[in-house]
Image: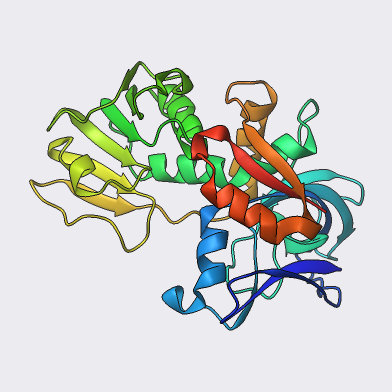
Amino acid sequence: MYALISRAGDPTPRLEELPAQTLGPDDIRVEVAAAGFTLFDAFVASDHAAISLPDVIGLGFDFSGVVTEVGEAVSGFAVGDRVAGLHGNPAAGARAHATEVVVPASAAAAVPDGLTLESAAAAPLNALTARQALDLLGTERGSLLVTGAAGGVGLWALALAKADGWTVDALVRPGTEHLATGADRAVTEIEPHAHDAVLDLAALNDPALAGVRDGGRYVSVKPGRAPTAERGIKVSTALNQPDGAVLADLLRLAADGTVPTRIAATRPLSKAAEAYQEAEAAPGSDGRWLLIP
């Protein structure tokens, strides 16, 4: 197999040939069809020490592909199944930016008919981040402000929040209001103390917290960077985790068009280093960048 590897001290990830990964009893092996780029990939590739990662790591979170082997304890998948999933361990020696990936079966979900493998690869990280962040807001509904609403996670957050029963305002940059599909209202400024809750996908921190009413709720998606709680506001941080059962439901929303899929570009895995530079410089609202083995 070939995998994109980052070595400490070398900011350029490189495609390396590795032995096939060991398959555990609860794992599946997937021949990767497409894998999504995230800014986290570029960040850790340039600085392992920032979050105490090993000197040698693989890169890539979400992927799609075809199952080529199943562990002896796996009952939900078979060889030949189309799947998508999330590799949740950033310290692993090989991850989703590879020709094959091994993950627990619980981290993957079947790709519904009508959804291409490329579109499926663009969904897991964005969809699960949005779902798990919204779940931190609890069961009480009201008015919700989503920052960074024109981005990939934002699209999912808007659709899921509306389905949950929220009244949703989407904070976007001027000129991108049309990208906030599914919101009740697109706004370009934060109104102080105006919302019951804020989902701060843009990591605005204190300015976004100012939009929450006294006693409201605030959720960040940036570990270690959430603002200090004030005015009785409950502050939480979403830590996305693989969840195949939840992902299965979310992929159906992508398949039926409830949440539109935006793919900015595809690049061959062999050109991953160049693709990282392109994708890092591109607007997030353009969609996901995918690597194709």
Residue 59 horizontal side relative to residue 26, left or right: left
Q: Position of residue 67 (x, y in %)?
A: 86, 52
Instruction: For residue 77, say whether it is visible.
Output: no
Q: Position of residue 55 (x, y in %)?
A: 59, 83
Colour scheme used in the picture? rainbow
Q: Position of residue 61 (x, y in %)?
A: 62, 56
Residue plotted at (76% across, 30% down)? 115
Residue plotted at (59% across, 61% down)? 88
Instruction: For residue 47, say whether it is visible.
Output: yes
Q: Position of residue 199 (x, y in %)?
A: 33, 39
Residue plotted at (37% across, 60% down)? 223
Could you say which is closer to the camera, residue 129 or residue 155? 155
Count the numbered circles shown: 0
Residue plotted at (45% across, 34% down)? 154
Relative to residue 273, is residue 193 depicted above or below?
A: above
Relative to residue 85, is residue 112 depicted above or below?
A: above
Quarter of the rendering occupied by the N terminus? bottom right
Quarter of the rendering occupied by the C terminus? bottom right
Residue 145 horizontal side relative to residue 42, left or right: left
Relative to residue 84, is residue 69 depicted above or below?
A: below
Could you say which is closer to the camera, residue 273 or residue 2? 273
